[in-house]
Image (spheres, coloured by chain):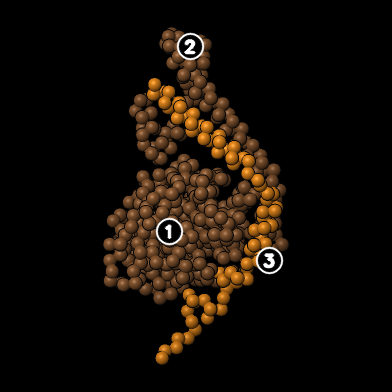
Chain colours: A orange, B brown
């Protein structure tokens, strides 16, 4: 009896696993060359706006200490 | 036998999942024995009905297992067919990056024990951090002042997140819950009094994140599941089952890309989920150990992962495969957390050897190593406008780098 309920839950689990794999196998894929080219394009298009990449002048970066401190 | 079966039926997620692994191995041996015509005297006397019941499920399971293996092979073949080039080859003509000068610009001191998690506020200056000492602190990173502090009823607060409005923080850990604290402008107000318990898991909370609004929270847990909750009512909106072990991290897709998120776990898998249906739509299993951190590429078409196997990897969602590995023979300690710079060209990785490695995402090379922390780097996030990134460490401090 215990073998039975263990077997039927194994069955449900195996069915779920196969269903999931069928779903994953059926998705549309593109070639790596295409995908990689798009990643590269995105990087290059946004490079100029990336502060950590190009660096911003100290005065614009809130974390870089300002050269002089004005005290009033 | 009886004991094991009943625990499979009754207890939720974690023990049920570990039951699966044990049961699969167990089911293979009885098949041969029952179908064997030369069975001993014991089997010959089995009532025919019971014998039929015992035979069929095992046969079907064997068929399903076969189909499962066939599908896995087919999946690998399909993925391999499209693997016509490597990312770094496509990036050969791209100008290499120059020298990087990144230094610690602020050190946030105040936690009494290991910093486990941190998050930036959308205002690009506030930070929330949580620690093993049970404290959750909100800092102004420009001035390094502490603005709020909450003491949680548990130690090991492994997850914390800032609400998009900046008006609340969520956190949790060994208490198995995710709680939301509204932040009061009145510094004297006791934040703990306004606490709202939102998520309930059956094991530790490993990560949490607000979705596009303050109204919903996504959580991941040691119980092997992820879940989406309504903050106001505490109601479970959707649960995500599929990991075979603790889920350690999650990241939401950038809002332009739609309702998906990625999670990584101790089962070495990174899964991409549809938030509306609860369905796992893609799964990647190339890491050799626990995945500690996952982060979407800014365009939403890819994500990076950091693992105990000392590598970080890039997976492209449209090609449905791993497209880059960031590793070096000299790096032998696990990567605990990863994040991209604004353009996605740089990948920052915090490691268990106390360093932060900065990788050129396209070329696959390391462009800088940052030293400073005196113990493991446990958490790392780039600020919302990309001007700096913050790292938290087991050395009790957080550092802001720019």
User: Which one is in front, B100 or B316?
Assistant: B316
Q: Residues within 10 Å of mark 3 (few under 14, many from 20)?
A: few
Which x, y percent locates residue B170? 38, 59
Q: Quadrant of residue B154?
A: bottom left
**Badge 1 element:** loop
- Residue underneath mark 2: B39
**Which one is closest to the eye, mark 2 or mark 1?**
1
Up-down: is B116 above or below A28? below
- The chain letter for the residue carrying disc 3 is B
| Residue B80 shows up from this direction | yes
Decide if residue B114 is in sight here: no
Query: Which label is found at residue B95?
Result: 3
Nearer the camera: disc 3 or disc 1:
1
Which residue is rendered at x = 44% and y = 66% of the image? B165
Q: Which comes before the other along the chain, label 2 or label 1? A: 2
Q: Residue furthest bottom?
A: A72
Q: Chain of mark 1?
A: B
Q: Earlier in the sequence, mark 3 or mark 1?
A: 3
Q: Secondary structure at mark 3?
A: loop
First-in-chain label (3 vs 2): 2
In three-dimensional space, the C-alpha distance between marks 3 and 1, rounded to whole angstroms, equals 44 Å
Residue B131, given in percent of the width and then of the height, sits at 36, 59
Chain of the residue where label 2 is placed in the rendered structure? B
Q: What is the secondary structure assignment of the residue under circle 2?
A: loop
Contact (CB < 8 A) between labels 2 and 1? no
Residue B16 drawn above or below residue A44: above
**Are both tags, 2 and 1, on one chain?**
yes
Residue B215 is labelled as 1
């Amino acid at each position: 009896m215990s073998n039975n309920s263990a077997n039927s839950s194994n069955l449900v689990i195996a069915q779920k696993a196969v269903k999931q794999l069928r779903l994953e196998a059926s998705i549309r894929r593109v070639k790596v060359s295409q995908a990689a080219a798009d990643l590269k394009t995105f990087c290059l298009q946004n490079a100029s706006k990336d502060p950590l990449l190009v660096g911003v002048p100290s005065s614009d970066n809130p974390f870089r200490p300002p050269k002089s401190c004005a005290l009033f | 036998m009886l004991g094991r079966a009943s625990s499979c039926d009754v207890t939720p997620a974690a023990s049920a999942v570990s039951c699966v692994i044990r049961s699969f191995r167990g089911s293979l041996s009885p098949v041969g024995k029952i179908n064997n015509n030369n069975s001993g005297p014991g089997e010959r006397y089995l009532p025919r009905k019971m014998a039929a019941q015992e035979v069929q499920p095992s046969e079907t399971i064997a068929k399903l297992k076969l189909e499962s293996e066939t599908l896995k092979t087919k999946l690998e073949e399909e993925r391999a067919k499209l693997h016509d080039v490597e990312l770094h080859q496509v990036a050969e003509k791209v100008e290499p990056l120059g020298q990087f000068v990144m230094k610690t610009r602020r050190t946030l001191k105040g936690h009494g024990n290991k910093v486990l998690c941190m998050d930036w506020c959308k205002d690009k200056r506030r930070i929330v951090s949580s620690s093993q000492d049970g404290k959750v602190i909100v800092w102004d990173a420009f001035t390094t002042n502490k603005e709020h502090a909450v003491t949680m009823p548990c130690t090991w607060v492994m997850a914390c997140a800032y609400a998009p409005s900046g008006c609340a923080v969520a956190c949790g850990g060994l208490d198995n819950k995710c709680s939301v604290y509204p932040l009061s402008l009145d510094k004297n107000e006791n934040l703990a009094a306004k606490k709202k318990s939102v998520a309930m898991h059956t094991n530790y909370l490993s990560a949490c994140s607000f979705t596009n609004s303050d109204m919903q929270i996504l959580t991941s847990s040691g119980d092997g599941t992820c879940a989406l909750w309504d903050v106001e009512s505490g109601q479970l909106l959707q649960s995500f089952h599929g990991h075979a072990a603790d889920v350690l991290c999650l990241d939401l897709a950038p809002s332009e890309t739609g309702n998906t998120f990625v999670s990584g776990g101790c089962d070495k898998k990174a899964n991409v989920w549809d938030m509306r249906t609860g369905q796992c739509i893609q799964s990647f299993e190339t890491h050799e150990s626990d995945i500690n951190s996952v982060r979407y590429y800014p365009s939403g078409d890819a994500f990076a992962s950091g693992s105990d196997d000392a590598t970080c990897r890039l997976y492209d969602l449209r090609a449905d495969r791993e497209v880059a590995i960031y590793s070096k023979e000299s790096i032998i300690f696990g990567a605990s957390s990863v994040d991209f710079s604004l353009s996605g060209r740089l990948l920052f990785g915090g490691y268990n050897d106390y360093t932060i490695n900065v990788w050129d995402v396209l070329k696959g090379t390391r462009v800088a190593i940052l030293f400073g922390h005196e113990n493991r780097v446990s958490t790392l996030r780039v600020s919302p406008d990309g001007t700096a990134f913050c790292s938290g460490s087991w050395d009790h401090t957080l550092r802001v780098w720019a």
